[in-house]
Amino acid sequence: MSIALKTPEEIALMRIAGRLAGEVLDYIEPFVKPGVTTAALDKLCHDYMVDVQDCVPAPLNYAPPGYAPYPKSICASTNHQVCHGVPNDRALKKGDIVNLDITTIKDGWHGDTSRMFIVGREASILAKRLVAITHECLWVGIAQVRPGAHLGDVGAAIQRHAEKHGFSVVREFCGHGIGLRFHEEPQVLHYGKPGTGPLLEPGMVFTIEPMINAGKAAISELPDGWTIVTKDRSLSAQFEHTIAVTETGHEVLTLSAGAPPKPDFID
Ligand code: MF3
Ligand code: CO
Ligand code: CO
């Protein structure tokens, strides 16, 4: 088992898929308001990807071994939902936090990115702090990515930052290599020890997508077979980017005009 290296030409195509995924999040942002359902957000994103961007929404009918085909085009995970929340007909309300996770396929190449949204732009102090720290966790992970670093450096930096702030890191789901396939090697753990795991090389492309809980790390799966929630029903947050390892460091492939800026303390 090995980690495929992408050529510069392939990374150029992934840059397009990645930017388009980010632009779906930019597009949907003004619709994420009290009263909207996640099913309505799914439909808007689906139509934007298909009709405007000429992309394929990767989640729709995605069926990894042991899973029923995913029924929607985006994931929408609210409050204590950790990831893979299936859009539904419940209305969002002021103070909810929701992760929207978009994966586009353009010319066969995948781009995968997610952001948190604070519904009504107002939430509890805890919810806002969890969202801010989780975004920082994504970026402290990204900051580790360069040739010669180990993949474990990414997880270690994320775990350290989350736990320093009294939060916990979900263990069961991780980032992943990405390319012509949605999920490929390597697994990118969001916890671990520096200096462990594969050495990073230019041409590797993978996601970093920490899921950070306000309470304990344990999760459970809902009967729909997809939606993951915190076992203690504490709040959970996640941000995701797709990253390429370059000769000198890294390139974030899923940046777009509306992406939240990297935190000031990151170089
Ligand atoms: N986008 C998710 C990830 O970051 C995967 C979602 S799989 C789905 O890896 F089937 F739920 F869409
Ligand atoms: Co992903
Ligand atoms: Co994703």
Image (cartoon, grey):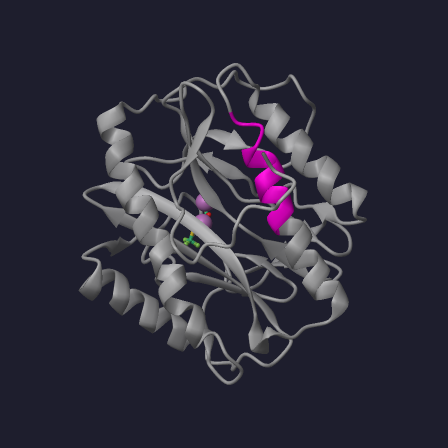
**Image quadrant containing the N terminus:** top left
**Residue 144 part of the magenta segment:** yes
Would you say residue 58 is visible in this rendering? Answer: no
Q: Report the side of 110 relative to 30 (left or right).
A: left
Whole-percent x, y for residue 190 in the image: 62, 37
Whole-percent x, y for residue 164 in the image: 80, 42
**Residue 11 part of the magenta segment:** no
Would you say residue 57 is visible in this rendering? Answer: yes
| Residue drawn 22% across the image and 54% down it | 55
| Residue drawn 40% across the image and 18% down it | 247
Classified by dominant secondary structure, the portion drawn in magenta counts as helix
| Residue drawn 40% across the image and 61% down it | 25
Query: Magenta segment, which residues?
Result: 135-145
> How many numbered discs sit on the rendered protein?
0
Q: Quadrant of residue 266?
A: top right
Q: Is residue 122 above or below residue 256?
A: below
**Image quadrant containing the C terminus:** top right
| Residue drawn 30% across the image and 39% down it | 15
